[in-house]
Amino acid sequence: MRRGNSLAATSVNALEASDDKQLIVRFGVVRTRIPLAELTKVEPTRNPLASPALSLDRLSIVSGPGLTGTVMISPADREGFLNELASKTGLKRVGDRLERGLSNL
């Protein structure tokens, strides 16, 4: 679901990009803000670890090292979410994932 100038997806969790600078992941009363500039990779996962995503058909969003730099979500419109996130972050779309491009190789 798209609202104005923000990314949004709903299942039980809600996602949105605020001011084109951050991704906000909400689950109940918990809210996590991830600066879009810090995103390094978005990829599909079926990891059963606890996360704001109830479905096992998830996207893993990586913004730092280890588990603390990763959040798993399940957007209602996966394709729309990936396309919009790619345009807002500069991440390169490679199939069903997003990656930082390697420069100066």
Image (cartoon, grey):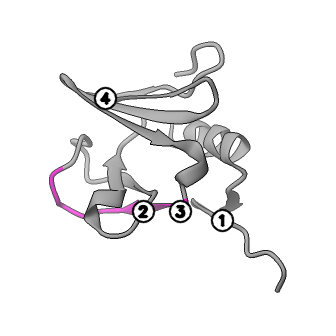
Which circle's residue, 1 or 2, is located before the other in the chain?
Answer: 2
List the single residue furthest toward the right: 104
Position of residue 79 measured from the top left corner of the image (x, y, whole percent): 58, 43
Q: Which residue is mark 1?
A: 100
Position of residue 26 measured from the top left corner of the image (x, y, whole percent): 31, 29
Which amino acid is tagged 2?
Gly
Secondary structure found at label 4 = strand
Residue 104 counted in the magenta span: no
Which circle's residue, 1 or 4, is located before the other in the chain?
Answer: 4
Position of residue 100 measured from the top left corner of the image (x, y, whole percent): 66, 65
Mark 1 or 2, which is nearer the eye? 2
The magenta span reads 40-50
Q: Residues within 10 Å of mark 1 (few under 14, many from 20)?
A: some
Query: Where 28 sits versus 22, above or below?
Result: above
Secondary structure found at label 3 = strand
Task: Decide if residue 85 is on the left or right side of residue 50.
Answer: right
Q: Is residue 76 visible?
A: no
Which circle's residue, 3 or 4, is located before the other in the chain?
Answer: 4
Which amino acid is tagged 4?
Arg
Secondary structure found at label 2 = loop
Task: Decide if residue 91 is on the left or right side of residue 7.
Answer: right
Q: Which residue is mark 2?
A: 64
- Label pair 3/1, CB-CB below 8 angstroms: yes
Mark 2 or 4, which is nearer the eye? 2
Q: Which residue is mark 4?
A: 26
CA–CA distance in space, label 1 to label 2: 13 Å
Q: Residues within 10 Å of mark 2 (few under 14, many from 20)?
A: few
Name the disc covering residue 41, or none. Answer: 3
Which amino acid is tagged 1?
Arg
Which circle's residue, 2 or 3, is located before the other in the chain?
Answer: 3
CA–CA distance in space, label 3 to label 1: 7 Å
Task: Report the residue at 46% width, 57% height from top.
Answer: 63
